[in-house]
């Protein structure tokens, strides 16, 4: 099935035969509110349907052999939304972990959480810790949930940590390299995203994985997040395979496949 666009017509990306998956797929899950509005429903219904799309996407990612799936669930800037919607989004995260953690663990999924814990309630922090700890020994898909996450805020925290190490004499300023900055980001040990998908037709990063996406291939899909499914994921992967990744050189990096 082809993904439909926001107006319900077929998008122009052909349904592919997936050859090899990208190692790391990152997704900006956008359009829940517009999906609901188009149906005369309250925005929260769109967020609920968005959780179903997350379940489908995790399942499809496992089936397709994707190693890392990172999903943007709540941005540092989403606090600007009405308090009632913020509370609903917090509640949905709790519900998702309570309902789905056992299944994720059974499916060998390792859960990682990135973002700032400051500002989150103690019960959410405990659930996030539980999800990470209980799934830490798994070796299948790494599902990273970006919650209360902002790329700029992440870089500020990394810069502060490095500055503290310089101030204490643990490292010298010249010791700071790309690798050392990488090691102080929330995404430490997670490879950079190869494919970054945003749904809903918006074409911006909205503060998602700014450092890590330096050479990600960006695919913008004209469908709302609650309509995302395996065929939409395959369409994005197909678009990814049509790209030539040169990483600044004159030759194709040939890095469009899992390594
Ligand atoms: C994405 O959908 C979910 C979050 C940002 C939490 P939106 O809620 O942004 O939906 P739109 O963009 O208003 O349609
Ligand atoms: C980005 O979507 C954040 C998430 C998907 C969690 P937004 O809907 O918040 O982004 P903007 O405001 O349209 O840039
Ligand atoms: Mg949005």
Image (cartoon, rainbow, N blue to C red):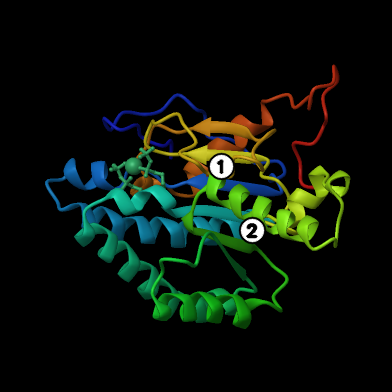
User: Which element carries disc 2, helix, strand or loop?
Assistant: loop
Pick the front one: 9 or 95: 95
Determine if the C-beta at disc 2 is less than 8 A from ligand 2.
no
Kindly identify which residue carries mark 1: 234
Give the residue at x 45% y 39%: 206
Q: Nearer the viewer, mark 1 or mark 2?
A: 2
Give the residue at x 17% y 43%: 37
Residue 181 x, y percent position in the rendering: 75, 49
Residue 10 x, y percent position in the rendering: 36, 29
Residue 175 x, y percent position in the rendering: 88, 48
Q: Is residue 98 visible?
A: yes
Vertical side of 126 occupied by 50: above or below = above
- Count up the numbered dots: 2
Kindly identify which residue carries mark 2: 186
Q: Can residue 65 be seen in this view?
A: no
Q: Earlier in the sequence, mark 1 or mark 2?
A: 2
User: Which element carries disc 1, helix, strand or loop?
Assistant: helix
């Amino acid at each position: 099935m082809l993904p439909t666009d926001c107006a319900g017509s077929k998008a122009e990306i052909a349904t592919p035969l997936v050859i090899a998956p990208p190692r790391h797929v990152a997704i900006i899950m956008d359009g829940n509110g517009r999906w609901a509005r188009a149906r005369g429903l309250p925005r929260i219904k769109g967020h609920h349907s968005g959780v179903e799309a997350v379940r489908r996407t995790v399942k499809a990612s496992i089936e397709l052999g994707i190693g890392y799936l990172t999903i943007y669930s709540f941005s540092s800037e989403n606090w600007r939304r009405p308090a009632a919607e913020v509370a609903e989004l917090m509640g949905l995260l709790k519900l998702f972990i309570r309902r789905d953690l056992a299944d994720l663990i059974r499916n060998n999924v390792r859960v990682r959480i990135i973002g700032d814990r400051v500002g989150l309630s103690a019960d959410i922090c405990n659930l996030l810790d539980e999800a990470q700890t209980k799934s830490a020994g798994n070796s299948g898909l790494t599902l990273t949930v970006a919650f209360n996450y902002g790329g700029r805020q992440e870089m500020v925290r990394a810069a502060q940590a490095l500055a503290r190490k310089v101030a204490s004499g643990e490292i010298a300023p010249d010791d700071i390299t790309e690798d050392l900055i990488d090691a102080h980001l929330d995404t430490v040990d997670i490879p950079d995203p190869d494919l970054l998908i945003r749904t809903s037709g918006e074409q911006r990063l909205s503060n998602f994985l700014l450092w890590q996406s330096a050479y990600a291939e960006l695919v913008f899909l004209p469908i709302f997040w609650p309509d995302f499914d395996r065929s939409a994921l395959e369409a994005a992967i197909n678009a990814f395979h049509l790209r030539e990744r040169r990483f600044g050189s004159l030759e194709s990096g040939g890095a469009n496949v899992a390594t």
